[in-house]
Image (spheres, rainbow, N blue to C red):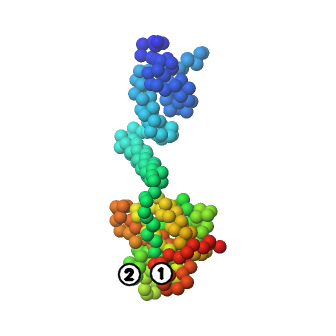
Amino acid sequence: MTAMTGYLSIGDFSRATHLTVKTLRHYHQTGLLEPADVDPYTGYRRYTVEQLPTAQVIRRFRELGMPLEEIRAVLATTDPQARNDRITAHLNRLEDELNHTQRAVSALRDLLAPEPAAGTPGVELRRVPAVPAAVIVETVDAEDSVAWLQGALGELQATLAAQHLPPTGPAGGVYADELFTHHLGQVTVFVPCAGPIRPLGRVSAQIVPAAELAVMTHCGPPTDVDRTYAALAAHVARHALAVDGPIREYYLIGRHDTADTTQWRTEIGWPVFLTSPGDQHRPRSAKPKQ
């Protein structure tokens, strides 16, 4: 029952808005939704019917996970464009989180699906020669590695273009074990090229050493690249002689080539030991990595 015409008690306001009394008190204490009147003797809170739409807006924002501080900023903004920009930014974050969740669910469903009856993964044993390259070498946090890689590749490609040095092969990366084992390690991202490179910014010249690798191609974005890593590791454990050494990746098709992530192709190279030229393209018997 209302205390007077146009006013609602906190209990009635709670029933009308589906916000608990405890929540309404918290919103009062934080200044998000203050009652229209508070009895100085009893402390009873009263709300006006005009506050119902505001309470409904707050409830919807909270259902969408918007922090209280952001809701307060939205409600306090008188500029419609600024208010819409804040709401749009939050909706964009929600869409990003939803896409991430959907990809994780899809990957989990794939993992739970039965393995195909036939299907040894396509693994190539390859000798990679040493090549001169433009490189960027830094210690990178695994959590930031994808964004860092894109920035480094862009910087390398821009530097080569400015110095009129065409790439002589696909860009790649050399990843120290610590990046995987401790989520912090050295990464060398490189673009092979011929001709003298003038160091500029983070870019320098380096010879990327030769390597012997078991190579598998990952199709798509790096979201579920761990599945390709796992398949390659299992294949190497069963069919090749693994050796100590950094993992390599070669970026055949990526963000700089197309926005269609289904077209992206990354070769993953696991270090192995090849004893003769005939080992290339042929699996070896399994031996444990030391």
Which is more N-terminal, label 1 or label 2? 2
**Mark 2 and mark 1 residues within 8 Å of each other at the beta carbon:** no
**Kind of residue at badge 1:** Gln
Q: Which mark is residue 166?
A: 2
Seen from the viewer's position, the closer of residues 183 and 235 is: 235
- How many residues crowd around disc 2 within 10 Å: few (fewer than 14), some, or many (20 or more)? some
Q: Is residue 56 above or below residue 259?
A: above
Determine if residue 229 is in view. Answer: no
Seen from the viewer's position, the closer of residues 32 and 114 is: 114
Q: Which mark is residue 280?
A: 1
Q: Which mark is residue 118?
A: none
- Picture residue at 48% right of the left edge, 84% below the top: 278
Secondary structure under the numbered disc 1 in the rendered image: loop
Q: Is residue 210 above or below residue 225?
A: below
**Kind of residue at badge 2:** Pro
Outermost residue to the right: 290
- Picture residue at 52% right of the left edge, 82% below the top: 210
- How many residues crowd around disc 1 within 10 Å: few (fewer than 14), some, or many (20 or more)? some
Q: Nearer the viewer, mark 2 or mark 1?
A: 1
x, y percentage for residue 222? 45, 61
x, y percentage for residue 8? 46, 17
